[in-house]
Amino acid sequence: MLVSLGSALFTMMPLQTQELQPNVDAISRVIQGIATGVGFLGAGEIVQQSSRQSSELEIHGLTSAAAIWVAGALGIAAGCGLWQLGLIGAVLTFLVLNVFKRLENRR
């Protein structure tokens, strides 16, 4: 929720400062920065040092990292006022996460 809120706030800032004629370049740079920053958070979620004594890296948290990235995108959609796109994205994300969790539990 915090990733979505932060993404929405960062997206709304250039829109609010240029009420009559929004600067598309500024909004584009904000969205690129959000995607990069949220990707960095996701990378931290994925790569973790192994709990074993070896120096191998274990890969965990791909779904969590993807969910964080989608949360950022949903926040950008909300910040741009694209509530229909955000709603559709949230519903699809919820469905995907639930379907794959059930498939994973069957294995």
Image (cartoon, helix red, strand yellow):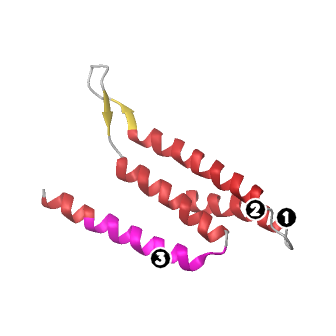
Q: Of all residues shown, which one is farthest toward the left? A: 107
Left or right of 42: which side holds 29? right
Q: Does the magenta-highlighted stretch encompass residue 76? A: no
| Image x and y of residue 86, in percent | 54, 73
Which contiguous range is marked in magenta? 81-99
Left or right of 33: which side holds 49? left
Q: Secondary structure at mark 2?
A: helix
Label 2: few (<14), some or many (≥20) within 10 Å?
Answer: few
Label 1: few (<14), some or many (≥20) within 10 Å?
Answer: few
Q: Quadrant of residue 76?
A: bottom right
Q: Tell me: residue 72, above or below residue 57.
A: below
- The label number, if any, that marks residue 88 in the structure image: 3
Q: Residue shown at 72%/59% (left/top)?
A: 27
- Check whether the beta carbons of the residues at disc 3 and disc 2 lie within 8 A of each other: no
Left or right of 99: which side holds 106? left
Q: In the rendered image, which residue does mark 1 sit on?
A: 17
| Image x and y of residue 44, in percent | 47, 39
What's the amino acid at mark 1?
Answer: Thr
Q: In the rendered image, which residue does mark 2 sit on?
A: 24
* Residue 103 visible in rendering: yes
The residues bearing labels 1 and 3 have C-alpha atoms spaced at a distance of: 28 Å
Q: Of all residues shown, which one is farthest toward the bottom? A: 84
Label 3: few (<14), some or many (≥20) within 10 Å?
Answer: few
Magenta span: helix, strand or loop, mainly? helix
